Amino acid sequence: MSSKKKYWKNVEELENTSMAQKLKQNEFPEHIPVNDFLGDKETLEESTTNRRDFLKYVGFSTAAATLAACEGPVVKAIPYVVQPEQIVPGVANYYATTIADGFDFTSVLVKTREGRPIKIENNELAGSDGVANARVHASVLSLYDNTRLKAPQVASKTVTWKEFDAKFLEKLARIRTEVVLLTSTFSSPSTSQLIKDFTKKNPNLKHIEYDAYSNTEALDAYEKVYGERALANYDFSKADAIVGVGADFLGDWQGGGYDLGYSKNKVPQNGKMSKHIQFESNMTITGANADERFVATPTEQKKIVAAIYAGLFGGAKVSLSSKLSGAVKKAIAQLKSKGKKALFVTGLNDVNAQLLALAINTKLRSEALNTASPKLTSVGDTKKVDQLVKRMQSGKVGALIMVGVNPLYTYANADAFEKALDKVALKATFSTHLDATASKVEFVGALPHYLESWGDVEFNKGKYGLMQPTIRPLFDTRQFQDFLLTSVGATTTYDAYLKDFWNQEILKGLSFNKALHDGVYEINNQAAASANLAVVNNTVISALANAKPSSGLELILYTKTSLGVGAQASNPWLQEFPDPITRVSWDNYLTISKSDASDLGLENYNVANGALNGSYVNITVGNSTVENVPVYIQPGQAKGTVGLSLGYGRDLGGKEEMNVGVNAFPLYKNANNVQSSVKIEKAEGIHEFACVQLQKTLMGRGDIIKETTLEIFNTKDKKKFNTTPVVSLDHQVTPVTSPDVDIWDEFDRSIAHHFNLSIDLNSCTGCGACVIACHAENNVPVVGKSEVRRSRDMHWLRIDRYYSSEETFEQDNEKKEGFAGLGESLSGFGKMEDPSENPQVAFQPVMCQHCNHAPCETVCPVAATSHGRQGQNHMAYNRCVGTRYCANNCPYKVRRFNWFLYNNNDEFDFHMNNDLGRMVVNPDVTVRSRGVMEKCSMCIQLTQATILEAKKEGKKLSGDDFDTACSRACATGAMSFGDINDPESSVAKSLKSDRMYHLLEHVGTKPNVQYQVKVRNV
Amino acid sequence: MPLKCFEVIILLFDMKKVNHGKTASRYLLLTLVFLLTFSNFSPVKAQDADPKKGKELFNSLCAACHKRYKKATGPALFGVTERHDTEWIYSWVKNSSALIASGDAEAVAIYEEYNKTPMNAFPQLSNKDIDDILAYVNEPKATKATLPGPVGGGKEVNGASSSMSQDIVLGLLAVVLAILVGILFLLNRSLKRFAEKSGVEVKSSCDASSCRPLWKAFVENQFLLLVSAVLFLLLSAYLAYGYLMQVGVNQGYEPVQPIHYSHRIHAGDNKIDCKYCHSSARVSKHSGIPSLNVCMNCHKSIGEVAEDTQAKGLAEYGVDYNKEIGKLYKAVGWDPNTQSYTGKTDPVKWIRIHNLPDFAYFNHSQHVQVAGVACQKCHGPVEEMEVMYQHAPLTMGWCINCHRETNVKMEGSEYYDNIHKELSKKYGVSKLTAAQMGGLECGKCHY
C-alpha cells in the first residue's frame, strides 16, 4: 500500500502556486545580481582569465610579495653636524616652562627627547601652581597640531612677517581714532610693560582684557572689599571645614588648581579629616568628592549663601525648603565650630554672593583665605567688551587688535560683534588657528605654541612663572610681544627684553638662569590686604535672600575637564578623554534630571551593542536658540536645572572628526554662567553618544569600591569596613588571601624589587590628569568617536565612576543584604541599577592590576603575556597573535585590543597619521600594530630606567624612587608607586594599612595594585 | 622602495667581493718593503741632519698644526729654509711670541697672516733637533705617479701568478682526465673490434625481458621509494626552515656608506677608543653616530692621510682616503684652504647597519657601562673592519644565549649588594648570570 500522503512545506506548495513552483526550481526566486557585482557581463565572458588562472595569479603574487617582503628596507641614520652640548640621543632633557593660554596657567616641566617635547609633568617647585590638569598634560599634542596657522596672512594671503609689519604699521599710522587691543588675560609683567611702551607711541590705544569664561562678578566683589582687581586665593590645605555653594573648585572654578590643597586633609590622619559640604545644581567632580552633597537650583543657592551668612553673623531669616534648611544648619555648624579652619566658597556669578563669601571668610578669620597674594590669571571684564561692541558700532574704534581671543566664537552676541567689526577700519588678530575670528579679519598673525615661546606669568601677586621655548618654532610664527617690539622700533628680541626686564624689575640681582631653571620665582614679602566690609550691607543680603525663582528652567553653563573653553578643541587626546562624571567622550550635551527629562519626554537608552543613545532638544534663552543638543540624563542634577558645557562646537575647518558638539556660547549671555527662563523643546532625531561606561550604579557590590564613614573607621575594627572575603575549606572559614585556598604556587618575589601601585580612593578627585599622562607616556592611540561607541577605546587607565541607588553606598549595601528570597532580589537588583536623585559618587582608577596569579597569563596560547619577578605582568606585543583569550579571562577588563592599525592610517585622521603628530610619540615605548592586545605595563620603561640609573651610579635604591606616568601626574597623592620589598617605602606601609584592599579579592588574583577604602566624613 | 633594496643587495654582494682580509696582509708587507727601499733613495740635503729623527720630532710636536706640503693651522713647512733664515727659524721655534714682541717684521707678518694665533714655544729643542726637523720637512714630495704605480703593478702580477698556478694545475688535471676518457673509449672500441674479428659474441648482460632501466627498478621498489620520499621531505623541510629562519637576519650586512670610513684605520691602526666617538654608548640607549664636529676634533689638522696609508687604500680597497676626508669637509662645511668653516653644511646620510626591530628595547649603557661588555663582543673585530658590517645575527636567540652564559658584574656596586647576597643564597652560587637576575623575562626587552 503505497502512501498517497502529500507532504508540503507550506500552504503555497499545497496550493501549487507559481511561487512554489519557482522555489522548487530555484532556491532564490528573485534575481540575484551576480553579474552586477562581478562587473560587466560581456567583458567577463570575453575575458580569457578563467577561475584557475585567477587563482594562479593570486598564488604567485602572494608568494612574490612574501618573498619581496623578506628584504628589510634601507634605514638612514643622520647624525648632527654639530651636536648641541646638552643633547645626547636617547636621553631625555627636562625644562621648566609655563602654560598661559588665557584659561590654564600652570608651571610645568617639559620632557624633551632629541629636541622635541613629548610629555608634560608637574613642576613640584611651583606648589599648587605647578599642578597640571588633563588639558595641560595634553597640551604637548597641540604643539604638533597640523591645523595650526603656519604663517601670517594679510587678506587671506600668506605673507612674510616683514610684509605683514610694513602693511600693518602703515595702516595703523593712518588711524586717528581709538585703537583697541583686545586680549585674553596675559598676567605677564613683561608684556604689560611692553604694552605700556606701545601705548606711549600710540596714545590712543586702549587695552581690554577679555576672558572667554568670565569671573567678572568675583573680580568686582574682590575689588570692592580689598581694593584690587584680582581673584581671592585660597589654601584649601588650611581648611578643616569647607562649604561650597555652586563652586566647582576641583574643576575649573576661578582657574582651578585647588585639588592639591584640598586632598591634603582628605586622608584620615589621627582620626581626623576635613569635612566638605557642597550645594550645587550640576553634578560636578567637586560635588562627587564632597562628604555631603545637596542639590539646589541657582536661585536656592543664592538663598543658601544669604542663609549661611545670616546664620553665622545674624540677619534676616531666609525661607528655604526643609531639606535645604537642615543642610544649611549643618553647614553653619561646621563653619562655626572650625572657625579659623573653615572656608566658604561660592561659584555664583553674582556680586552679592561673592561679597558675602568674602565677608564670611574674612569674619571667620579663615586661614585659608590668602589676601596677600590674590590670583591674577583671570582679570577680564566682559562689561568692557560690551561697551567696546557699542563703540565699534558707532564707528569710534579705528583699529582692533586681538590677541589670543576668539570673540566671534566665545562672545555671546557674536553676530553683533561681527557687524560691529565691519565698521572698524583696521582689524587684526593674533591666533594659533584660523578660527572664526581670524577668518573674518584682514591681518592674521600666526602665534606660536607656548612650548615655542618666551614669556612670564604672575600667577598670584608675587608669584611668577617663566616660559621658555623647548623647541624651535615649527612654523613661520612669531610672538605678539615680538610684534610689539618691532612696532615700537626696538631692535631687541622679546627673549632679550624679557631677561632684562626680569633682571631689573623682578629678580633684582638674583640669577635669571636659576629662575629659568626652576620655572617659578616667588617674592614672599606681600602683606595681607585690609578688608573693607562696609560694602556688605543689608541690601546685599536681602537681594540674595529674596531671589525670585526662575519661571522656566535654569541653565548652568560650565566648562568640561576635557576642553575648557575650547582652546584645544583640535586635540584628539582631549576629545577622546571621557568626562569624569558622565563618562562621555567626543561630545557636549545637556545634562538634565530624570524627572525633568520624563516630563519633557526625553530619554536615554542603550542599544543592542551597549552604546548610549539620547534625544535631541532645542534650547532657547531670550532670543538665542541652540538647536539639536543631545540630552544626557544626569543623576544628581537639581530638578528645574539643566547643564551645558562651553568649548565645543567650534568650527575648526580641516578635520571633520574633530568638529563635534554644539556651541553653547550664544547662550552665555552677559557672561553669566546661570541663565534663567530657559525653554527646552524636544527635537527630532536620536543622538549617538560615545560613552565608555554602561553601568551607572555599584548595585551594592561593596567589594569593588569599599566606602565607610569616618566614625566607623575611627571606632570600629577593620572587619567592619574592610572585610577580607572568605571561602569554605574543609568546612572551615578561610580568608581568600590564605595560601591554603590558592590553586597556584607562589613565586618568590622577595628579592630585588616588587612593585606595587597604591590608589587612595580618598584623595582621588577623578580629575583625569593620569589618563592623559598615561596616553602621552605609552603612545596610546586615539580611535575616534565611532570606535569608542563600539567600546573599543584604548585607554590603558580608566577612571570608573559609580553612583549609589540609595542616598549612599552604605544604604545600597544594606538594601542588598536585606533581600529576602529570590523574587525580591530579582526585582530589587533591577531597581538598584537606577541611581538615586542625589546619589553618592565614587571614582576608581582602574588599570591592569598586575595580578601575581594572573588569569590572562594562563590562557594565552602563545605565552605572549607572562609574569615578571618584579610584579609586573608583561605583554610581548610581537608575540601576540590576537586571540583575545586574555581579555576574556581578565576579571578587571583592562586589556585593550588593536582592532585596526591606528598609526599611519588615514582612516584614523587624528595625530598618528602625519609626521607632525607622530613627533609626540615616546621613543621608549613600542607603537602597537593591528591585531595585538595591549594594556598597562606599570610603566616598565620608567622602572627599568630608574634601575639602570642606579646601576650606572652604583647606588642603592629606596622603594620610593620609582614612578609611573600616572603616579607622577597625580599631584593629590592618590596614586603612589614603589617597591614593597623596601619596608620603608610608602607602598609597603600602605600595604599594611587597615584601609588596604584589592579589587575583586575573592577571585584570588593577588593583584599588585592596592586600593585604600574611601572614608567620608559624614 | 623595492628597487632601492635590490640595489643595496647588489652593492652588498659587490662589497663582499672586495672584502678579502688575508691577502691584504701580504700586500701590506710587500708595500712596506717597497716603501722602505724607496725611502733609502730619497735625497738627503743636509749631511749631518737626520731626517728620520726629524720625522719623529715633527710627528710628535709639529704635526698638530703643520703639514709639510699644505697649509694647516700654521704654514706649510716645505721649503721653509728658503723663505726664512735658519737662525731666524731657531729663535722663532724656541719662542715665537718673544720674536713677535720684539717687533721682528717677518714674525709679525706671519702672526697677522695666521689670525694672530701664536705658535707654541719649544725651548726644549736644540738647534740640532730643529735641523733634523728641517731636513725632514725639506724632503721633496714623492710624486703619486711613481709611488703607488709599481706597488699596484706588483700586486697585479702577484695576484695573477697565484691564481694562474691554480688554473694551470686544474687545467692539467682536466687534460689528464680527458686523455684517460679517450684511452678508455679507444680501448673499448678496439676490444670490441677484436672480439668481432675473433668471432666471440659479445653478450649483453641482460636480455629484453629481465633487463629494466634503473629508474623503473627504483619506482617498482616500494621500500626504496618510501625511504627516499621521506628523506626528500625531511630535506626540503630542513631547507625551508633554514631559509625562513634567516629572513630578517642581516648578519654580514655591509652597505656602501656615503663616506668610506675605515674603522681599521681609526680603531685599529690609531687605537682610538670606541667610546671617544660613540660617547653616548656610556649614558644612553643609543651608541650614537658621532656628530661631525667630533670628526673635526682630529680632522681639522688631519687633512690627508699618511702616504703609505693612502697607497694601501688605493691598492687594496680602491679608496682614495684623502678624497673621503674631502667629503667630510664638504659635509661639515670646512674649507681646508682658509682653515675655516663656511657655515654651509650637508649632513651625512649614513646607512644604518644594526637595525633592531621597534619592539625590542636595547640599551647600550646597560651593557657598556654597567656590565662592562666589550664593544667587540657584539660588533666583532671592528678594529679590523675596513668597511663596517653586522657581525652578530642580532636574533633573540643570540641575545638570550649571552644572557644565559654571562655573569653579571656586581662587585663594587651598592645597587647589587643585597640582591647579590640573597640571590646567590637562593641559587647556591657565588656568580650570577644575567638570566638568574631576571634577564630572560619578556618585559625586560619588550615594552
Image: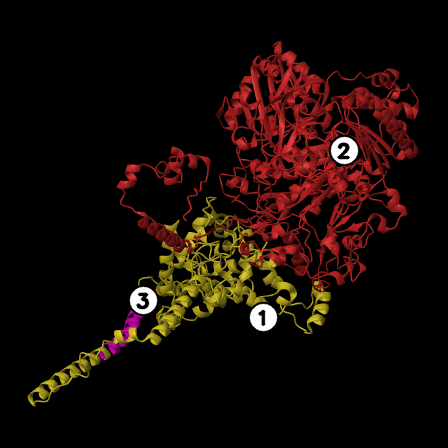
Q: Spot the residue most to the bottom.
A: B198
Vertical comparison of A698 with B18: above or below? above
Magenta segment range? Answer: B148-172
* Local crowd size for mark 3, using a 10 Å CA cut-off: few (<14), some (14–19), many (≥20): some
Q: Is residue A155 left or right of A231 when viewed as pictured?
A: left
Q: Is residue A405 visible?
A: no
Vertical comparison of A783 with A873: above or below? above
User: Where, by quadrant of the figure, is residue A97 drawn?
Assistant: top right
- Which chain is drawn using red? A
Instruction: Provide the secondary structure element on which disc 1 rests.
Output: helix
Q: Nearer the viewer, mark 1 or mark 2?
A: 2
Q: Spot the residue most to the front.
A: A1
Q: Spot the residue most to the left.
A: B197
Q: Is residue B257 left or right of A940 when viewed as pictured?
A: left
Distance between the alpha carbons at the discs numbered 1 and 3: 47 Å
Q: Are marks 2 and 3 in contact (CB under 8 Å)?
A: no
Q: Nearer the viewer, mark 2 or mark 3?
A: 2
The residue singled out by tag 3 in the image is B152
- Which chain is drawn using yellow? B
The residue singled out by tag 2 in the image is A836
Vertical comparison of A543 with A253: above or below? above
Question: Please, what is the three-letter code of the amino acid marked with disc 1?
Answer: Glu
